[in-house]
Amino acid sequence: MQSSPILEVRRLTRGYPNGTATLTVLNEVSFSVQSGETCAILGPSGSGKTTLLGLCAGLDAPSSGDVLLAGRPLAGLDEDGRAKVRNDVVGFVFQNFQLIPTLTALENVMVPMELRAEGSAVRRTVEKEAGELLQRVGLGERLHHYPTQLSGGEQQRVALARAFINKPKILFADEPTGNLDADTSHRIVDLLFAMNSEWGTTLIIVTHDIELAARTGRILRLRGGQLVSDERHRMLAGGPAAPPLEAHA
């Protein structure tokens, strides 16, 4: 018997005021994703990919339709309610890293757990886990460096560690290699898939990169705000788990 989907999207529509009219960015998109799936949302610029990801993650509210995240409907929740769901089950990786510039790499990784960390003993445990994650992504010598002291590849590896710190059930990645050179991009993708496999996390990637999309087991294609195809396929071989990256990447 198949378990309930980790993500259900039901006739999701998002429009924005445009003068006297409404600009419809997404139009009645529906699909579901099972726990443990890897899925790419593929489409050209302006197709609604990032808008869809934001709605799925509860970063925005739809004009109509609903999203169920780990069985919890997001409709009717205020921002605080959606934030709680995100903190409980979601990890994020963004194109522009979204690190807090005044915090060290270690402190940035700890941010998602700050709301849960009560008491010095718990905080020490979180700090230890954050340090181990940074070691895992090859930044064991960069714990106390600030984002401005890190390369783009290093910043994205901090973001990867942060995404996994709360042991998310589902990880959303929005163009995770969009600001990186080709060589660093490949190594970040290898690391993302290796860590995702280790944690058994559901992975949803927004991308326009067909090669990256082919690394997943399923491709959802958007065009003009509509879901035009849903393809399941055999994933390209990802190879063995990636070793920690060189500090300069």
Image: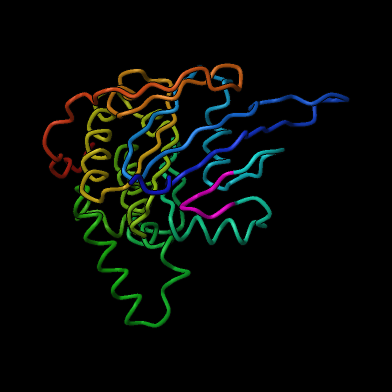
- What is the image's colouring? rainbow
Q: Residue at x 85, y 25 (%)?
A: 19
Check the image and report above or below for 58 versus 236: below
Residue farthest right in this picture:
20
Q: Nearer the viewer, residue 97 or 248?
A: 97
Q: Is residue 200 left or right of residue 228?
A: left
Check the image and report above or below for 54 versus 88: above
Q: Is residue 54 left or right of residue 140?
A: right
Q: Residue at x 30, y 29 (%)?
A: 217
Check the image and report above or below for 128 versus 183: below
**Overall secondary structure of the magenta stretch?**
strand
Q: Nearer the viewer, residue 114 or 74?
A: 74
Q: Residue at x 34, y 78 (%)?
A: 122
Q: Is residue 72 magenta?
A: yes
- Count all numbered tags in the image, as a single digit: 0
Task: Indicate the position of residue 8 as horizontal and vertical percent values.
Answer: 51, 42
Q: Nearer the viewer, residue 34 or 45?
A: 34
Q: Is residue 9 magenta?
A: no
**Bounds of the magenta segment:** 67-73
Check the image and report above or below for 27 versus 114: above
Task: Indicate the position of residue 244 as horizontal and vertical percent values.
Answer: 15, 45
Q: Is residue 10 left or right of residue 213?
A: right
Q: Residue at x 53, y 42 (%)?
A: 56
Task: Indicate the position of residue 171 as horizontal and vertical percent values.
Answer: 39, 45
Q: Nearer the viewer, residue 245 or 240?
A: 240
Quarter of the image where one finds residue 240: top left
Task: Name the image quarter holding the C terminus.
Answer: top left
Task: Indicate the position of residue 59 as horizontal and vertical percent values.
Answer: 58, 46
